């Protein structure tokens, strides 16, 4: 009996996410995909972000370092990658208004381009760039990958903060096919949890 009471108390104190899920409440969005590192320049750049139902930017979950920071060569000052290479995740650049962001703001969502292939996973906690909880409503998750220079693919999924936990249907749009680099980002999934 004592063990059961302790287990119940522990579940009440620590179990808010699982309890909320049992009631059908969504706490987060998990985005995952299989990343296969590609050889050469002009590839391996991607961004994941959230928009509201009007298509307005809410928050970047991740953007690769070259895109936001660039690379210094020969003693030159680094320029943001999307300036040097305008085909570098161009939809994210436009939607996020990257030009208006400070280096510190971009640093907060930037990560190194993975050196090894494998599953990449990111989570959105229903907050905006300032860390404030977003209003209930309809949102879009977008995953954009620059496969090779002008070859760009965007996966989009629309969902509501009132939806029950489960998979979100994603659609994809490819700007220009590239057979050699087509497997850079595959098995893209978005799951409400």
Image: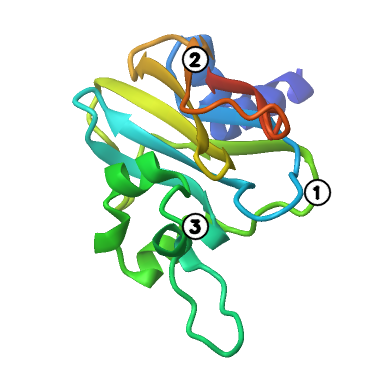
**In front here: 95 or 41?**
41
Task: Give residue 67's mark.
Answer: 3
Please tell me in which quadrant of the rendered image residue 12 appears.
Answer: top right
Q: Is residue 186 left or right of residue 79?
A: right
Residue drawn at (44%, 66%) of the image: 80
User: Label 2: few (<14), some or many (≥20) within 10 Å?
Assistant: some
- For the question of whether residue 170 can be seen, the reply is yes
Pointer 2 residue: 170
What percent of the width, then of the height, locates residue 56? 22, 35
Task: Give residue 2's mark.
Answer: none
What percent of the width, then of the height, locates residue 81? 48, 62
Q: Real-space Cα distance between discs 2 and 3?
A: 24 Å
Q: Real-space Cα distance between discs 3 and 1?
A: 18 Å
Earlier residue among tags 3 and 1: 3
Q: Is residue 7 above or below residue 117?
A: above
Residue drawn at (75%, 24%) of the image: 2
What percent of the width, then of the height, locates residue 139? 31, 24
Q: Is residue 51 left or right of residue 82?
A: left
Mark 2 or mark 3, whichever is nearer to me:
3
Pointer 1 residue: 116
- For the question of whether residue 128 can be seen, the reply is no
């Amino acid at each position: 009996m004592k063990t059961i009471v302790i287990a119940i108390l522990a579940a009440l104190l620590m179990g808010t996410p699982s309890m909320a899920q049992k009631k059908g409440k969504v706490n987060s969005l998990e985005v995952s995909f299989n990343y296969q590192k590609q050889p050469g320049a002009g590839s391996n750049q991607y961004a994941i972000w959230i928009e509201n139902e009007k298509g307005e930017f809410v928050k970047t979950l991740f953007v690769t370092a070259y895109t936001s920071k660039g690379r210094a060569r020969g003693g030159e000052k680094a320029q943001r990658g999307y300036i040097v290479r305008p085909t570098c995740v161009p939809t994210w650049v436009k939607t996020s208004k990257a030009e208006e962001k400070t280096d510190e703001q971009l640093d907060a969502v930037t990560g190194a381009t993975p050196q090894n292939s494998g599953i990449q996973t990111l989570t959105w906690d229903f907050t905006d760039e300032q860390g404030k909880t977003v209003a209930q409503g309809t949102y879009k998750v977008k995953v954009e990958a620059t496969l090779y220079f002008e070859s760009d693919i965007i996966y989009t999924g629309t969902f509501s903060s009132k939806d029950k936990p489960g998979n979100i249907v994603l659609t994809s749009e490819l700007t220009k096919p590239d057979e050699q680099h087509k497997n850079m980002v595959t098995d893209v999934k978005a799951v409400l949890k």
